[in-house]
Image (cartoon, rainbow, N blue to C red):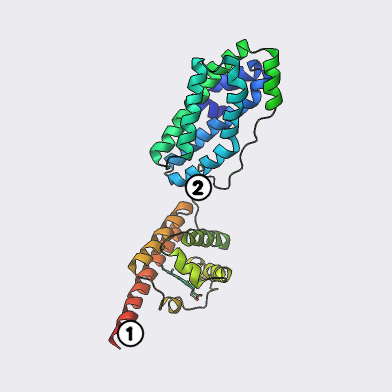
Amino acid sequence: MQVSLLNYLGLKHDIMVNKPLKRHPALQPLSREHHFALLLCLKLRQGLELEIDPNRIGAYLVKMWEHQLALHFDIEERFVFPILGEDHAYVKEAISDHRLLKRLILKEPFTIKSINRIEERLENHVRFEERKLFPLVQSVASDLQWQIVEQEHDKAIPELMWHDAFWVKPVRKEIKTLEEISFLVDTFYQRVQSDELIGPIFNELLDGRWEEHLKKMYTFWQTLLLEEHTYFGSPFPPHATMPISAAHFQAWLSIWKSTVYEFFKGDKADEAVYRGEKMAQVFLSKIKYFKNQNNTH
Ligand code: HEM
C-alpha cells in the first residue's frame, strides 16, 4: 500500500528509496508525518471521486488538523525553520503554505473546490519540503541544532484512527441475510434521525422506544425481502395521525433509496426500494383520505 501510494504520487523515489538512507534521524519523525499527509491527500481525492459530501470530508480534515498538522507545523516553525533563518525564501514559502492550509481547513466552508485546493496545496507543500527544504536544512544544521530537533520531536505523531472511512468504496452486495437487513435498517434510521425534516418526528414519537422500533423493522423487512415471516403487525395504523405529507415521504424515500443502493445491489435491493415507494404512496393517499374525512365530518 505504501509503495503503491508513493509510486502513484511520484514520490517513491524521494521518500521510500532515498530518504530512509539519507534523511537525518532528527528529521525522520517529520518525514514520517509527511507520509501521513500524503495518505491524507489520497483520501481526499478518493472522497471527491466517490462524491462524498464535502462536510463529511471536512470533519476528518478538522480532526487531522488538531491531531497532526497543527503540531507538525508548530515543530517545524519553532525548531527546523530557524536553522535556515526567517528570511530564507524557502522558510517564507513554507510558512505561507502553513497559513493558507490553516485558513482553508479552519476558516472556510468545505466545498468540492476548497477540498481540492487543500489537497493540491498540501501535496505540493510536502513535495517542496521533502525535495528542497529538508535537504538544505540537512546540509547546514549543526550538531546542537539536531539535538534540539530530536529532543523536541523524537517520535512521529501516530496515525489518526477515524470511524468514518469515506475514502473506501463500499462493496455493494446482494441482500441475503438478517444481518444485512439489520445493518440496512440501522444505517437508514441513523440517517433518518439526523434529517432536518423527518428526524424530529421520529425522535419525538419514538422517544425511549428506538430499540423496540428497530427490532420490529428488522422483522418487517425480513418478512418482505427474505420471505421469513417474523412480522405480524399492521404497518399503516401508527402513521394515520402523524403530521406527515408528501414532502416527508419524499425525504423518507430519498434516504431509503440512497442507503439501499450505497451498500446493496441486485433483485432484493430493487425490491426493497420498490416496496418502500409503493408503501409510501399507499400511506400518503390513506393519510389524505383520513384528513378529508375528518374535515367533512
Ligand atoms: C416520513 C414518513 C414516515 C414516518 C415519519 C414514519 C414514522 C414511523 C414511526 C414513528 C413509527 C413507530 C410507531 C410507533 O410504534 O408508535 C413507524 C412504524 C412503522 N413504519 Fe413508518 N414512518 C414513515 C414512513 C414509512 C414507510 C414509507 C414505510 C414503509 C416501508 C413505513 C413502515 C413502518 C412500519 C412497518 C412500522 C411498524 C408498524 C407496527 O407494526 O407497529 N413507514 N413509522
Residue 95 position, x and y percent, is 51, 24
User: Can you name the residue that lies furthest to the top here?
Assistant: 139
Residue 157 versus residue 265 in the image, above or below: above
Query: At 52% across and 71% down in the image, what residue appears?
Result: 206
Residue that label 1 marks? 294
Q: Amino acid at mark 1?
A: Asn
User: Can you name the residue that lies furthest to the left here?
Assistant: 296
- Mark 1 crowd level (few <14, some 14–19, many ≥20, 10 Å Cα): few
Between 25 and 50, which is closer to the camera in this rendering?
Answer: 25
Does the numbered disc 2 mark a residue whose Cβ is under 8 Å from ligand 1? no
Residue 147 versus residue 287 in the image, above or below: above
- Mark 2 crowd level (few <14, some 14–19, many ≥20, 10 Å Cα): few
Circles 2 and 1: CB distance less than 8 Å? no
Residue 274 in view here: yes
Residue 115 position, x and y percent, is 43, 37
Between 52 and 175, which is closer to the camera in this rendering?
Answer: 52
Give the mark toward the camera: 2 or 1. Answer: 1
Q: CA distance from mark 2 to mark 1?
A: 47 Å
Query: At 58% across and 44% down in the image, what residue appears?
Result: 162
Residue that label 2 marks? 170
Left or right of 96 in this view: 81: right
Q: Amino acid at mark 2?
A: Pro
Give the mark, 2 or 1, whose residue is nearer the N terminus.
2
The image quadrant where one finds the N terminus is top right
Left or right of 153 in this view: 258: left
